[in-house]
């Protein structure tokens, strides 16, 4: 993580975003605005979000970008996506995903909540230990199957379902249609996307309070399905 010499926070890297958003993020990192106490605020970036790590909490702000697979260029779109992320993830991790909060005030002196026009929205989460990330566990040799690839998924609404854009470090890029009703989670790929489709794929999982029981299945024609492998996720 690279330290900024003229501010009491640290930024991992810079990525394209609207200048007002960069100014807002820098202002939010000043002492006393977020729940960080006297601790510095760390900022992590992806190509679509800023994540501000402030004490026991983390605030995710969607970047005002318009990419081929998502459009966060308006404030209403960013609010809608924050609400969708909260709705999808809170049943799986209620102690982590807390709320969607409005950022008000001015770019120079923002406030969480408060009166006046809304400058931006943020997804408020409870911060968890970074050494609990899959990538960190993999580096420490604590994963039973080290051949498992490092993955990234971007999920966006699409009609009455969702589109999951999947990437991993093997170079695999795929699109899955996703549904989730709070108890059943499904993914399905039945059309060629970034690669050929030698077989159909689907994922079916039941979601409980502390575990997700899932199975990947394959089919040559999309009608007769066979088990590929099972997956079990436990809350620890």
Image: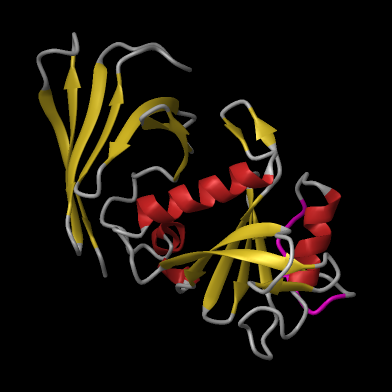
Image quarter of the N terminus: bottom right
- Residue located at (71% from left, 44% from top): 64
Q: Position of residue 163 (x, y in %)?
A: 42, 30
The colouring scheme, among rainbow, by chain, secondary structure or one colour, is secondary structure
Q: Name the residue rendered at 78%, 44% in the picture.
A: 16
* Stretch in magenta: 7-14
Say whether residue 6 is magenta: no
- Identify whether 100 is placed above or below 160: below
Q: Quadrant of residue 149?
A: top left
Left or right of residue 85, residue 147 in this image: left
8 or 73, which lies in front?
A: 73
Give me the residue at 45% from left, 60% from top.
139
Magenta region, mostly helix, strand or loop?
Answer: loop
**Quarter occupied by the C terminus:** bottom left
Does 143 appear above or below 94?
above
**Whole-percent x, y for residue 219 in the image:** 17, 16
The quadrant holding residue 38 is: bottom right
Q: Position of residue 63 (x, y in %)?
A: 68, 48
Q: Nearer the viewer, residue 104 or 29?
A: 104
The reply to whether residue 147 is in sight is: yes
12 inside magenta stretch: yes
Q: Give me the residue at 49% from left, 30% from top.
A: 171
> As displayed, is residue 175 above or below residue 83?
above
């Amino acid at each position: 993580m690279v330290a900024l010499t003229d501010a009491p926070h640290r930024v991992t890297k810079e990525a394209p975003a609207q200048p007002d958003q960069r100014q807002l993020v820098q202002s939010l990192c000043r002492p006393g605005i977020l729940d960080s106490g006297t601790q510095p605020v760390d900022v992590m970036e992806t190509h679509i979000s800023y994540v501000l790590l402030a004490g026991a909490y983390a605030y995710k702000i969607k970047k005002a970008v318009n990419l081929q697979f998502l459009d966060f260029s308006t404030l209403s779109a960013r609010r809608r996506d924050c609400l969708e992320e909260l709705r999808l993830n809170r049943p799986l991790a209620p102690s982590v995903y807390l709320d969607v909060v409005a950022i008000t005030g001015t770019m120079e002196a923002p406030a969480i909540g408060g009166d006046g026009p809304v400058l931006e929205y943020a997804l408020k989460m409870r911060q968890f230990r970074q050494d609990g990330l899959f990538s960190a566990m993999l580096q420490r040799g604590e994963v039973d199957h080290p051949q498992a690839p490092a993955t990234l998924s971007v999920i966006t609404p699409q009609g009455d379902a969702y589109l999951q854009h999947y990437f991993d470090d093997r170079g695999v890029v795929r699109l899955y249609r996703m549904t989730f009703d709070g108890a059943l989670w499904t993914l399905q790929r039945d059309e060629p996307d970034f690669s050929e489709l030698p077989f159909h794929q689907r994922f079916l999982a039941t979601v409980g309070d502390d575990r997700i029981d899932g199975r990947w299945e394959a089919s040559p024609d999309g009608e007769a399905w066979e088990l590929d492998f099972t997956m079990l996720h436990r809350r620890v």
